[in-house]
């Protein structure tokens, strides 16, 4: 483990995001195993949200599949590891509202939660399996939303 990985590991334990990830994994009866660079891999996640095949809480990468079905693609593992570093940089669980705010902005502008989400972009859109969508005109989106809300 590099010194940067050790620092991420320590910060995510101190900010309680890794503990939260492990509690979530235990609550969902995941098979938790040590992963590379101080990460934990939790297999067999069954929650309804998020809809992603893998997601990260602290230093815990939760995966929908079980180990017998295959392994995390190296690019996806790297993508999720970058999210782990983002948890450390955001002081832990404050990452979540920041992420959801960035996802809402991206959804408004592109119709996709990842395309303009700074956290997904910095983690690598392609590595996470995302396709970048073009920006849509904001004025037209707001006008369409207002027209739908007007009473008939």
Image (cartoon, rainbow, N blue to C red):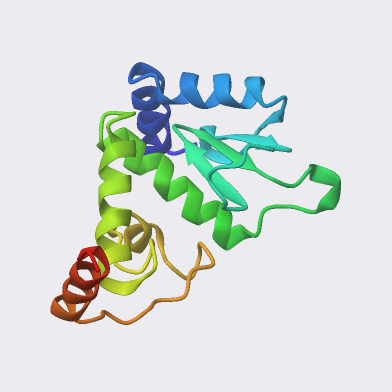
Residue at 43 percent of width and 39 percent of height: 2
Looking at this rendering, what residue extends furthest in the front direction? 152
Q: Position of residue 75 (x, y in %)?
A: 56, 62
Location of residue 44 by image quarter: top right
- 59 with respect to 66 (left or right): left
Location of residue 134 by image quarter: bottom left
Q: Position of residue 110 (x, y in %)?
A: 31, 73
- 26 with respect to 71 (left or right): left
Residue at 34 percent of width and 63 percent of height: 121
Work out whether residue 2 or residue 113 is closer to the camera in this orientation and state it. 113
Work out whether residue 143 or residue 36 is closer to the camera in this orientation and state it. 143
Residue at 48 percent of width and 19 percent of height: 19
- 71 with respect to 139 (left or right): right
Residue at 20 percent of width and 66 percent of height: 150
Q: Where is residue 53 in the image (x, y as percent from the top left)?
A: 62, 52
Looking at this rendering, what residue extends furthest in the left direction? 139
Quarter of the figure with the C terminus: bottom left
- 105 with respect to 4 (left or right): left
Asked if 38 appears above or below 67 in the picture, the reply is above
Work out whether residue 7 or residue 113 is closer to the camera in this orientation and state it. 113
């Amino acid at each position: 483990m590099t010194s940067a990985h050790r620092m991420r590991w320590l910060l995510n334990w101190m900010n309680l995001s890794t503990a939260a990830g492990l509690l979530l994994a235990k609550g969902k009866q995941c098979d938790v195993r040590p992963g590379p660079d101080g990460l934990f891999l939790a297999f067999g996640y069954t929650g309804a949200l998020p809809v992603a095949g893998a997601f990260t809480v602290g230093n815990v990468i939760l995966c929908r599949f079980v180990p017998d079905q295959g392994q995390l693609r190296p690019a996806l593992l790297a993508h999720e590891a970058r999210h782990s570093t983002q948890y450390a940089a955001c002081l832990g669980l404050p990452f979540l509202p920041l992420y959801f705010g960035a996802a809402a902005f991206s959804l408004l502008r592109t119709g996709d939660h990842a395309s303009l989400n700074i956290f997904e972009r910095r983690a690598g859109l392609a590595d996470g399996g995302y396709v970048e969508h073009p920006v849509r005109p904001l004025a037209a989106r707001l006008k369409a939303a207002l027209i739908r809300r007007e009473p008939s």
